[in-house]
Amino acid sequence: MKKYYPEGARPDIEAVEKRLSSPAELKNAFLSGESLEARAVLCDRGHNLDVDLRCMKGFMPRKECAMGIEDNTVRDIAIISRVNKPVDFVITGFSENERGETFALLSRRKLQEECAANYTSRLIPGDIIDARVTHLEPFGAFCDIGAGISALMPIDGISVSRIPHPCVRFSVNQDIKAVVKSIDENGRITLSQKELLGTWEENASKFAPGETVPGVIRSVEDYGIFVELAPNLAGLAECALGPRAGDSAAVYIKSINPERMKIKLIIVDYFTGDGKSPAADYFISDGHIDKWTYSPETSIKRVEVRFRRGRADPREPHQYRSCRQCEDQPSSNAGGPNGFHFRPRNDDTAGSA
């Protein structure tokens, strides 16, 4: 399967720079059908893009700026927002302006259609891919998964630990790893990342009772304070006056209980911080996964994600989905800040998250 990279993240940029060095090199790229990358410098009133090709001007007509523009399934903001950013394209020809100057005709749409046919349409749930964060919203992060084709990573797919906004984990133009979570009947891809950031046991193995470690306070409840220790791991601290969500903290680890997936903490100190999560470590970074089990083998609860093609099946057991309604409940069936419902181990029916 041919590989396509997010715009601005191409590993062959030196070869691209060579193609942009002269009109003759651009002609060779045109004849070979190679894709190139350059910076968009202007979006005119007709929403056509001017692209700086170094040795000449590039012109990208509106309908060639993105797949879906012509049939109005993609809005023009997808064009306007590319100004001062790299765009990937193929050269479709050359022309001259009224002053006799040669310019190249470009198509991003054609490259995206090629990427869709040869790459994104062949992805299946569970595939691990490269992505670049392009836009952050309260509900999730939009990512470029190849040639400017966008996919959404919902906020509950970013990590097991609950976060208030994707900006505490990601920044725009950050290159990340992601797993294809689902693909709908229209080919739209939904991404996830929590399955790559380690199981409860893998994350908890970095800590030991008696240690005092850094963390980020994620929520303050009547029954305790949830503190994120790692992107896929949180503990519950005893109630204290003063700490607020987003504060940085030093916490003492009282106990770690794999059977119940519980970490008990005491807040030693806290102070105003930026709310950013600890740096994420990828425990899985390539290949494909069919199933991911977050819970330890010895746990009385089982948290498992299975990947399958198509939309989420409405018949799947609710307890394996991400769920917000039980996050703030101290019940033994609540997942605390990680947003999961659980099923006891003695029920062997596995569902999908």
Image (cartoon, rainbow, N blue to C red):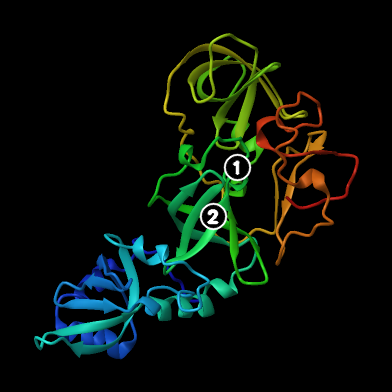
Disc 2 residue type (three-letter): Ala
Q: Earlier in the sequence, mark 2 or mark 1?
A: 2
Disc 1 residue type (three-letter): Gly
The image quadrant that residue 266 belongs to is top right
190 up-or-down from 95: above or below: above
**What is the C-alpha distance between the residues marked 2 and 1?**
13 Å
Residue at point 22%, 87% (across, down): 27
Q: 19 or 152: which is nearer to us?
A: 152
Residue at point 12%, 87% (across, down): 98
Q: 29 or 324: which is nearer to us?
A: 324
253 up-or-down from 110: above or below: above
Query: Where residue 307 sits: x, y (%)?
Result: 70, 59
Query: Where residue 341 sits: x, y (%)?
Result: 77, 39
Disc number for residue 178 = 2
Residue at point 74%, 35% (across, down): 325
Query: Where residue 342 sits: x, y (%)?
Result: 80, 38
Compared across the picture, whether 293 is left or right of 265 comes to right
Q: Which residue is mark 1?
A: 198
